[in-house]
Image (cartoon, rainbow, N blue to C red):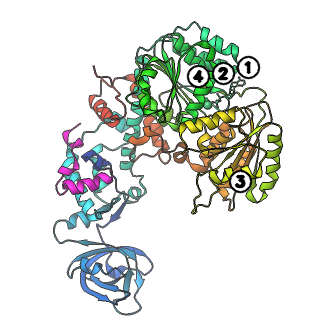
Amino acid sequence: MPDSAGLSVQFVKGVGPHKARLLAGLGINTITDAFHYLPFRYEDRSTFRPITNLQPGSRETVSGTIVSLKAKGHRLSILEVVIFDKAGYLKITWFNQPYLKRTFKMGQSLVVSGMVKQNTRDMPPLMMESPEYETLPDDADALIHSGRVVPFYGLTEGISQKQLRKIMFSIIAEYTADLRDPLPPDLLARNDLPALQESIRELHFPGNADHLADLNTGMSRYHRRIIFEEFFLFGLGLAVLRETARQEKGISFRPKGNLGRALLEQLPFELTSAQKRVIGEIRKDMQESCPMNRLIQGDVGCGKTIVALSAMLDAVESGCQAVLMAPTEILAEQHFINIRSMIGQLGLNVHLVTGGTKKNSAPSADVFSSDIIIGTHALIQEKVKFRKLGLAVIDEQHKFGVMQRAVLRKKGVNPDVLVMTATPIPRSLALTVYGDLDCSVIDELPPNRKPVLTTWIESTKKDDIYAVLRRELGMGRQAYVVYPAIEESERLKLKTAVQGKEAFAQKFPEFRVGLMHGRMHAEERAKVMSLFKKKEIDILVSTTVIEVGVDVANASVMLIVHAERFGLSQLHQLRGRVGRGVDRSYCILIAYHPVGEDARRRLDIMVRTNDGFRIAEEDLAIRGPGEFLGTRQAGLSGLRNADIVRHAAILEAAKNEAFSLVEKDAELKELPFLKEHLDVFWKGRVDLFKTG
Ligand code: ADP
Ligand code: MG
């Protein structure tokens, strides 16, 4: 990479430390950042429409010299300006912006864009009211801001459009020639993509107006090129990760299978055939010398935990440590409690690491001596060190990014990795999240699961459902009640968990009501959870902290308050908390007025199906994939302009190129510059290539 690429913009002509700080706020730290900070719109100022040709009722951009400047009024100030473009006059008015009087000077060039109107009060005959404007100095700067297709950038407080445009202009003029194209020419040709230098120039200061319309929709061939490059580098990183992992020497586990057998023998149920098949696939991976990188997909409640645990025992039996990382403290604690009880008699050391773990308890010492370590992302902190990490399991992978997974991997020497998710992702999007993984599907629920009966009602009919609740509780079952918020928020007027707990305690005095939310201490929550498990709490009122993975088989009612405010995946996850025993379970969704059209659609789908894969598809259709995947995908952060939703087709093409390149040349020996560039692209996230 040429030296200027990483150069701080501070050293660009006319920037300096103060402006550099402002630019940093826009994500522009280096020259490369600036290149990739694309305009959001362009205006053709190569030829302005003559004022004499203007038609009232159309939006136009014109340029002229200020020939009259009048401020009027006191309480309601009006600034009247007249410009002249050598043939015609245009009147322009601004209301209540007295400072503008100081902005403009007689004789100055002014560019205005706005709606042309008839001037009915005086002369000249045409006018604009409060148009967008720019003043043009008379020197060479004018060539940056007019007489061409002019870019408009997203701004930040303290920098004007013209200042930023000027900075960009000098960066493009000065540094574009240094740019080396990381994409090989044959790849460019195959995909009909323009070269890098040309693309950067055309995207910032287009040479002519030929591509104006495409530029303005963000779909010009130059955009396509930049977006392709981002996806390509991203996909290439994943492909390299996958390929190097395959070629690396991992651990060939040779478990006798005694621990796994002991586990299964004491289970009160038989594994489903899907579970057995997936356990088999994992065993096979683990015995091979290359490290496993496997994804397990399976709907809520299909029994992924036991499958993971079986693999963890295999690892432990081979003399390694196994770690399980979960997205929330609640879930980590839950796994900890469950797993400890399931393998209690096996004489293994199990340890929990969460952000809430007491600081003075020196987690590293405990971690070091444990067989099985369970925790949240606290596990990937630098200070957590393992003795011999053999297997890393990541639960509910969609809540983590590719990077977090990679960091966990690096805590061992080529450990096997197993990731689990209940959120199916459509193929086109899978690359960004699972591009480097092999996949197993648990496509079967344990037998005798009755589908959860789901209804949704408007809040006005609440009393009917209290009867259902009372009946279930009377039969010795338990219930969850989930609220979207903790404390009363006046603005949103939501029923809150804290209030809700009081209300339920009053309405159901014969039952014990507990409360759990994210602002409670981990120990407190663990206590509430264990009371609920021991059935010393009948109704657990909670926020969505119980969303993923919590498992109490005796709970048969899931009541969701303000269900209209929840997303589909979330509703499905919440519903998955019940229906885990043999009893019939109920999911009751209470919606508050007004229930919008999308909310109705979501609630209807919930009533219609229990199938997580179908629900995920519908969710995608309603929300679109960007929302669907959420912003937590740290792995996507390298994508500045590429958007997996809008640019799905480019993503597909870029992914194919990336994977086929790595298949031919995994270490990119033939393309040293691309390799260097790729390393920079992924820097600070993952070291793609081992040094030495
Ligand atoms: P998820 O796939 O959503 O993580 P879990 O692993 O939490 O599901 O399992 C859900 C519940 O089903 C747990 O209580 C678990 O003990 C139980 N379970 C798992 N496998 C079976 C099976 N084959 N038969 C009956 N119950 C099972
Ligand atoms: Mg689970």
Mark in the foreground, 3 or 4: 3
Determine which residue is flagged by label 2. 275
Q: Does residue 454 appear left or right of residue 429 in this picture?
A: right
Determine which residue is flagged by label 4. 308
Work out which quarter of the rendered image holds the C terminus and state it: top left
Q: Which of the 4 image quadrants contains residue 218?
A: bottom left
Q: Is residue 31 depicted above or below 427 in this figure?
A: below
Determine which residue is flagged by label 3. 503
- Residue 476 x %, y %: 80, 36
Q: Does residue 67 appear left or right of residue 585 in this picture?
A: left
Q: Secondary structure at mark 4?
A: helix
- Residue 480 x %, y %: 70, 42
Q: Which of the 4 image quadrants contains residue 314?
A: top right
Q: Secondary structure at mark 3?
A: helix
Determine which residue is flagged by label 1. 268
CA separation, marks 2 and 3? Answer: 42 Å
Tell me the crowding category of disc 4: few under 14, some 14 to 19, or many 20 or more residues within 10 angstroms, Cα based: many
Span colored in magenta? 1-27
Mark 2 sits near ligand 1, with its Cβ under 8 Å away: yes
Residue 578 visible in the snapshot = yes
